[in-house]
Image: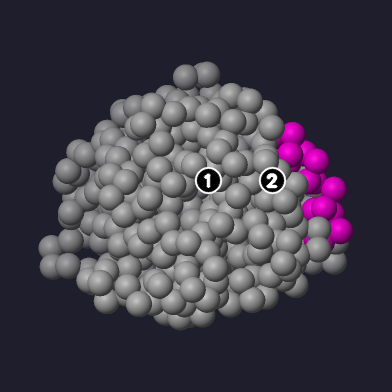
Amino acid sequence: MAGLMLQGTGSDVGKSVLVAGLCRALANRGLRVLPFKPQNMSNNAAVTPEGGEIGRAQALQALAARAELHTDMNPVLLKPQADRSSQLIVHGKVRGTLGSGNFRDARAPLLAEVMESYHRLSARADIVVVEGAGSPAEINLRAGDIANMGFARAASVPVVLVGDIDRGGVIASVVGTRAVLDPDDAAMIHGFIINKFRGDPALFADGYAAIEERSGWRGYGLVPWLAATARLPSEDAVVLEQGRQLAQGHKLVACPILPRIANFDDLDPLKLEPGVDLAMIPPGTPIPAQAALIVLPGSKATIADMAFMRAQGWDIDILAHHRRGGAVLGICGGFQMLGRAITDPSGIEGAERQIAGLGLLDVETELGPHKALRAARGRALGQELAGYEMHMGVTTGPGCAAPFALLETGRQDGAISADGRVMGTYCHGVFGSTGLRRELLALIGVGSAGEDYAQSVDAALDALAEALESHLDIDALLALAKRSGA
């Protein structure tokens, strides 16, 4: 068994993508490779076959490794919600809530369960590629850490540090990380990777050498800015404001960025459609009047996000859009917001117990402690649907008599308004189902290119692996990984 861990000089330096690329490259070499992230914090999650949930990035990495999803790949998942708290998911199941007051004390005891998952994965893999969280340079969070050096030292897994040259200051960020680390933590790091380089690599040769000299670590490669990354699902919310400009003749799909937005990768398949421009609408910005379709995304705290939507005036924009003949699609929490009301009698999401919805669907939702986590297959709008459900709450009312989808289990899902222009569903993955995406776009007068999203992602992973084979010393990384546990 071998193990290798990528940690970063900060968040969003590209660790998730590099782990995915390494998983595919190693799988292409014929190795049994599995991904692992001890602790993740994200509202983008995926449902595993056994009915658990893990971070969406680990689901992508499992796909890259050509492995079935398993909760051991991400044993601790924190999902931020209202009231400065996070839902705690351990081994795929809700275990409770962590707040800022008990976060540090509560996470340390989870290390034993993290190690159980890691050892189970190691027993069935030639190599486990591990992703850290944030940065080990956040030494204020070191006590009780299970995500970076706390795990690396417990598992005796060698670490390679990833620095992002695109954001600037990469020499200082790598060398500075070495400077602030405890010597025993620093001893776990054996080298570095410089990521997201643009231009002629020769121009950074002196900088690369300076990092090696000042840190005492060897470099494992300089990775260029990779176009294939744009075709992969994104886990971090920092990408949301990177919207495209509306091109002439295109139809605009608008999605408001809610504070607790969840599973926004539902929208990624729209990248495949040349006639569509997707606008992620940040707070303080009205939803454009020229939008043809407004998508209300998933939410980790539906009542709080509904209140935020109203405070932004987006409710007025959405209702005006509907009056003008525009279409609205709500997914999961977005579906709940389209109804008349959302109630939370048990205080699952926080102190607020109820709120009025948009009233565009004749349904009401009551939140409760049970969390639905299951695959969802069936038909919607006459087309095949393949996705998953991940939600708390039950939605009922007269509007459910006109469902959005009929699932293979015989259950009806969602609702469609009498005018056919407002649709809600609990099923994530509607745009990833090729025929269903075509029907949804037809409602706003856009022809679909008909490209299969899953195939597009798989091809992007192969392109990523090929690039890493060219720009990283993967043989040396494998040799380092074999020192795991030593």
Q: Which residue is mark 2?
A: 156
Whole-percent x, y for residue 182 in the image: 73, 68
Q: Residue at x 53, y 34 (%)?
A: 127
Q: Residue at x 69, y 32 (%)?
A: 119
Q: Compared to 277, does 440 lie above or below? A: above
Q: Residue at x 47, y 41 (%)?
A: 478
- Please check the rendered image and state whether residue 84 is part of the magenta-colored stretch, yes or no: no
Tag 1 secondary structure:
helix
> How far apart, in angstroms, are the residues tagged by discs 2 and 1?
12 Å
The answer to whether residue 481 of the structure is visible from this angle is yes
**40 on left or right of 480:** right
Q: Residue type at mark 1: give it.
A: Leu
Give the magenta part as a residue range: 103-117
Disc sitting over residue 362 in the figure? none
Q: Which residue is mark 1?
A: 480
Location of residue 347 (image quadrant): bottom right
Which part of the image, by quadrant, shows the N terminus? top right
Whole-percent x, y for residue 90 in the image: 73, 41
Location of residue 302 (image quadrant): bottom right
